[in-house]
Image (cartoon, grey):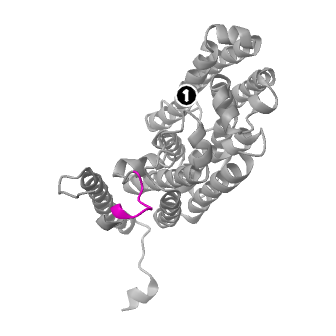
């Protein structure tokens, strides 16, 4: 089976890689958003060890 | 997988794309999980930060998707002989069983850990139990062993509103239990109606559905009994703190309609059903989808109107 750049397999792998990339980017954004939401909470306090330093 | 693997004797017939992995998550089931978990979260008396709420729903959905992938991994042999499921990614050769297993396990771990970090350990524990219940108790054990598979297995699909509630409040209350019970009691008549008009599929796959083990007459009786119990429960939920006049009106109307459908199914025999190609059973199945979305929709509307003095009691 010859493999050219136009092989359909590459298109499917590209869709998988692109999808995974977008999911990872969205995950990073979500973790950032969660962090901001948690530290903005009025109940949020730093652990005592870090407060001392 | 490298390009060289194309020459291997173990090459798959198809190299999976992103959509194939998404299909492993059973996206249609996931819409029910997302919707009911969201309602549980909205109806809870403790407000949540929108981003935390979004994350909670996302991870609950991901946990549901992980269950779906692991279910497809274990049930690939059944899926291959049933017309309704033969095109799923594993029986159609687009994804191997091992890939689906790894994908499902990874998602299960990520969803539980992330839900614990985003909300609390109770919600995460409930999600972990739900995945375990659906994959091990239902898929691996009950589904092929007992005709009550749908009844007990239905519990797995009933947990999302309780997890949503627990994510918001950090506890479980009678309202969360009743929302669980609503889906739990709704599942058997929903699936038995489906089994009545897809009879050959379950026969061929040798899954002990009630229609196969106890006969179709008995299944019709079971549908009626469960629908009557469901109606009492659904109306009863209207008198708790998550109910209200709107929910109660929706519940009374829909349960009267649903109960009539169950009586119609009970009064029919197989000749009548085959004459009109199971029209009544198909209508009942469609109505069951609207039934669940409308009940949970009404709970959500009650909760959203409450701050303006309109919703609730």
Q: Position of residue B248 (x, y in %)?
A: 61, 25
Residue B275's spot in the image, x, y percent?
65, 7
Residue B292 image-quadrant placement = top right
* Region in magenta: B6-13
Whether B122 is drawn above or below B309: the answer is: below
Is residue B190 visible in the rendered image? The answer is no
Chain letter of the residue carrying label 1: B
Viewer-closest of B236 and B215? B215
Find residue A5 and report its horizontal and vertical position in percent: 17, 57
Compared to residue B230, the image places residue B52 above or below, namely below
Residue depicted at x 29% and y 56%: A13
Percent from the top left, x then y, of residue B36?
Answer: 53, 41
Badge 1 density bin: few <14, some 14–19, many ≥20, Cα 10 Å: few
Q: Residue furthest bottom?
A: A53
Q: Residue at x 22, y 58 (%)?
A: A3
Q: Secondary structure at mark 1?
A: helix
**Nearer-the-camera pick, B122 or B302:** B122
For label 1, the residue is: B289
Question: Is residue B155 one of those drawn in magenta?
Answer: no
Residue B248 vs A17, above or below: the answer is above
């Amino acid at each position: 089976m010859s493999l050219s750049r136009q092989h359909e397999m590459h298109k499917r792998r590209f869709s998988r890689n692109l999808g995974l990339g977008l999911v990872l980017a969205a995950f990073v954004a979500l973790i950032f958003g969660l962090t901001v939401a948690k530290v903005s909470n009025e109940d949020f306090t730093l652990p005592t060890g870090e407060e001392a330093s | 997988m490298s390009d060289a693997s194309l020459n291997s004797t173990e090459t798959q017939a198809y190299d999976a794309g992103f959509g194939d992995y998404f299909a492993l998550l059973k996206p249609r089931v996931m819409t029910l999980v997302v919707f009911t978990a969201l309602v549980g979260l909205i109806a809870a008396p403790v407000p949540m930060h929108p981003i935390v709420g979004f994350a909670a729903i996302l991870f609950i959905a991901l946990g549901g998707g992980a269950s779906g992938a692991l279910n497809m991994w274990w049930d690939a042999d059944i899926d291959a002989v049933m017309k309704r499921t033969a095109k799923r990614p594993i029986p159609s050769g687009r994804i191997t069983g091992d890939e689906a297993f790894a994908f499902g396990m990874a998602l299960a771990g990520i969803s539980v850990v992330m839900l614990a970090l985003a909300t609390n350990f109770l919600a995460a524990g409930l999600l972990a139990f739900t995945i375990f219940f659906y994959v091990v108790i239902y898929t691996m054990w009950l589904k092929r062993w007992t005709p009550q598979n749908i009844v007990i297995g239905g519990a797995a699909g009933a947990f999302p509103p309780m997890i949503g509630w627990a994510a918001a409040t950090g506890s479980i209350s009678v309202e969360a239990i009743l929302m669980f019970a609503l889906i739990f009691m709704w599942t058997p008549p929903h699936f038995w109606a489906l089994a009545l008009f897809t009879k050959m599929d379950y026969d061929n796959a040798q899954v002990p559905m009630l229609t196969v083990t106890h006969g179709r007459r008995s299944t019709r009786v079971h549908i009626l009994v469960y629908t009557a119990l469901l109606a009492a429960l659904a109306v009863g939920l209207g008198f708790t703190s998550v109910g209200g006049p709107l929910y109660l009106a929706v519940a009374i109307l829909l349960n009267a309609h649903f109960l009539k459908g169950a009586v119609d199914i009970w009064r029919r025999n197989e000749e009548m059903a085959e004459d009109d190609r199971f029209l009544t059973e198909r209508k009942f199945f469609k109505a069951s989808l609207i039934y669940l979305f409308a009940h949970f929709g009404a709970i959500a509307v009650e909760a959203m109107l409450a701050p303006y003095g309109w919703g609730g009691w």
